[in-house]
Image: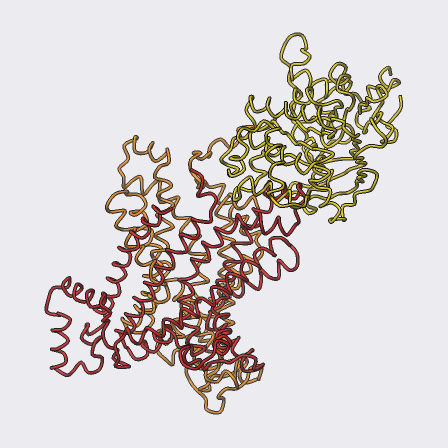
Chain colours: A red, B orange, C yellow
Amino acid sequence: MHRYFAQRLATAIPTMIGVSLVTFALLHVVPGGPVVAMLGLAATNAAAVAAVTKELGLDRPIWEQYGIWLKRALSGDLGTSTEFHVPVLQLIGPKLAHTLILTAGSLSIAAVFGVILGITTAVYHRSLYDRAAMLIMLIGASAPVFWIGLLLSYLFAIRLGWLPAMGMTSITGDASPMVVLRHLLLPAFANSIISLAVIARIVRSNMLEALVQPYVLAARARGLSRTRQVVVHAFRNVLPDAINITGLQVGFLFGGALFVEVVFAWPGIGYLIYSSIQARDYLTLQASVLVVSAVFVVVNLFADMARIALDPRERVG
Amino acid sequence: MSEIGAGEGAAIPPPSLSLELIPDSAFKQGARALLRDRMAILGLLTLLLAIFAAIAAPFLAPYDPDAGDGASILAPPFTANHWLGADEQGRDILSRILFGARLAFPEAVIPVLCAAIVGTFLGLIGGYFKGLTGELVMRSLDVVFAIPMVLLAVAIATTLGSGLPTVILSMAVVITPYIARVVATTTAQLRSAPFIDAARCAGLSERRILAQEVIPHVVPAVIVYGATNMGAMVVFAAGFGFLGLGAPPPTADWGAMISGGMKSLASAPWVSTVPGIAIVVVSLAFNYLGDGLRVALDPRLRSRH
Amino acid sequence: MNALPDGDARRGTQSAGPLLDLTNLTVRFSSPAGEVHAVEDVSISIGRGESIGIVGESGSGKTVTCMSMTWLLPSPPARYLSGRIVFNGTELKRTDERRLREIRGRSIGMVFQSARLSFNPAYRLGSQIAEAMRVHHRGSWRDLEPRVIETLRYCNIADPESILSHFPHEVSGGVAQRVSIALALLIGPQLLIADEPTTALDLLSQIEVLSLLERVRRETNTALVVVSHDLNVVRRIADYVIIMYAGRIVEEGPATEIFSAPRHPYTVGLLASAGHREKGGRLYELPGQPPDLAALPPGCSFRPRCPRAFERCVSLPPLYAVSPRHYARCFLLDAEAACG
């Protein structure tokens, strides 16, 4: 187990290096070069251009430039946002927390309801409930997440007024947890739908197999209740795959967060990225991608470990 | 009395392979299976209809999709003038939907095709050649996997400047690793198959082995992967439009139409809703068709149906 | 000759009233190939402390029958067209889930063919035993553990304490089977059903498991139903033998009579191919294939393979009495037809 952890950690490092290379490369692919990326519209000022050239070492060979950039990145200096004129990392910090809350919320909703749906549709296989649920899931999974967000917003916020459509400012400050939760509900749910459908589908098909296993029948023969058979015995063997697929959803949820944050004006990294796109603030964009990827790699690592720890098949041999 | 004969002895695959050689008769079986799948046929018909509508848009659309009529701003649907209503600039939504299809299909299909070609090439290298080249390819792909797909695509598109070509390029770049991974896994499985060894013993060069023996197995897997994910590609492409990275305004783009309708969501929800319905319908059609193809091309799944 | 009389009178029960009386069980499954007639009109009566063997090829319906004794099979996909179970004098209704849960394990225990697969691979053996016991007995693990250890030892399991902390895939098939029997004994059944208890085991383990079952039969008053396709197993352990073919009972009777004087051609063939009776000194093998349960021929299901079939066999023979407790489903036993 520990050996596996060390292995995975070891492969994560070159991966992160690769990610940093990609984000570094993005700056240089900008039409106009990194100078435009750093300075934006002020790129006509000769003195500023000279300063940036010296700072980034643009007159040096490309690998040196990467080294300079990497060193600065590791020490927390990711440049200054051309749009907001503050250091990028300072900008990203609080936003990242918001996005993590949103993603955690979406993941929880998707995991909990996905599992419940998966188990119940498997147990009531071929019933009306099963067919209806699967159809709704399929439709939900075929729809763009921002569209679902807008529909939910229209239905629950505008028409019914149960939940706020936007207006979340910051978790720090005087917003109480309840307020945060109320604002979180719609965007988190909207983002969760596709993942919910995927998790439900996987859990369902695995449960269908697990429910016909000999040990479930044997449990029944020993007088155990149906609930016990389904949850303690059948589902326990589906759990590793369920965790696996849930972990795989995180990357997808980060992507979805981008759209959902725009629809609901949720102050997270996704919204920041959106603003950076509009303002052509390449530094912020690149740094955001880098930070999100780093978080993603870490989350994947833990998801992998959880799966290994819980999978009885891994114990064999 | 015992009739367990050796009738179909000809195409018995080697036991270590999980994929099976697909001879002619199996293709016919697969086609028949597909035809029996009602939802897949429905999906296919829907898609054909949509493609036809896209091609014939200039003739079918009642209005110029880019021309806004001040008098019709936010007109509601189900009226004689505007069957699906009008948007925030008075443009007819039905016409914009029809013209939007002309973007939606290429934006979904072309990236997948490009990614299929490049991805297959990379996957073959990564899966077949153990050793530095293969490892290098696979590790590089891992890097792309580490960045959430949407974020990377959006970053690339922003960096290169918005527009249809960048959307297609960004999507292709981002999907290629997934196809490459599918190919690499399949190829790696096949590498250790006895009939590959046999081909080597017979003196076939590595390149010929790849071309003649490996690729025919890989192609169905790629087709299935592409087909089952095409629906998601339509949705993905719409995302670019939503963020403003797609074709420039006032071009009719389903995703851009949805974001355009955001401000008037309270008073005119149809502006954002209708384009979404179009996306869902096309995406669903692709999903059903793709699912049907998947079952039809994999003999093992067919018996369970 | 007489046709089949009422269930109870068919054999002298060893004490007042049978322990379990199953009548007219018919089970079907729907499959893509058609409706499978798994069990047709089977009636079995089990007396207290009696030991019964059910023999048949795969597909004969023996497993479905013994699982139906506690209505164990989930009802889709199984379809119970008819069947009545009376256990200890009261009827066991298929819909009475609560009563069934009390009975299962506690009064009627079951042991499966692959014992290792009958345990959940994710949990240790000890916790699965504890779980089953908690359903049926009160008391903490501390109170129950000594009994568990003792029963495991009774079942000839070396080092019982360590076995409890093992996972199912970490023990051998023979050990798993004996743990499985131990678990059944711990919950303390009046009737123990063993479905192919030795089939998945190597020879040595087979002997061990069989000896254990014999011991249980000798030393306790637990009734035993052993299902097997292996005649040797049944011969060792059963007082009464039931032969099934294509979902029906084709012959039944005391073990001594069945093995010395079988009357149904299928039984004769079975015994011959098992080497019990050689035909002309050569190894005998039953010709043909087992029937397709979705497309059974009319009349006697064995007719296509029967060396002694004649015209009458196109209708279904009833069970004829050969002796007070011995019955066979064959027209050859009908005196008039045999002569005519």
Q: How far from the left and from the top, in percent, is residue A308? A: 42, 48
Name of the residue lying farthest toward the top: C281
Question: Closer to the camera, A19 or A2?
Answer: A2
Question: Closer to the camera, A61 or B32?
Answer: A61
In the image, taking residue A177 as reference, residue C188 lies left or right, namely right
Question: Closer to the camera, B85 or A167?
Answer: A167
How many numbered marks does the figure carry?
0
Which residue corresponds to the image point at 42% horizontal and 72% vertical from the top-left?
A259
Which residue corresponds to the image point at 34% horizontal and 71% vertical from the top-left?
B164
Q: Quadrant of residue A255?
A: bottom left
Name of the residue lying farthest toward the bottom: B71
Q: Say if B256 sits above or below B225 in the image.
A: below
Q: Is residue C58 in view from this perspective? A: yes
Which residue corresponds to the image point at 54% horizontal and 46% vertical from the top-left?
B302
Q: How far from the left and from the top, in percent, is residue B39? A: 56, 58
Q: Is residue B305 in view from this perspective? A: no
Question: Closer to the camera, C271 or B238?
Answer: C271
In the image, taking residue B41 as reference, residue B218 lies left or right, namely left
Q: Say if B277 sits above or below B45 in the image.
A: below
Q: Quadrant of the C terminus of chain C?
A: top right
Q: How far from the left and from the top, in percent, is residue A5? A: 35, 50
Which residue corresponds to the image point at 11% horizontal and 73% vertical from the top-left?
A54
In the image, taking residue A35 as reference, residue C167 lies left or right, namely right
Q: Quadrant of residue B159?
A: bottom left
Q: Quadrant of residue A22?
A: bottom left
Q: Quadrant of the N terminus of chain C?
A: top right
In the image, taking residue A222 as reference, residue C126 lies left or right, namely left
Q: How far from the left and from the top, in percent, is residue A158? A: 54, 82
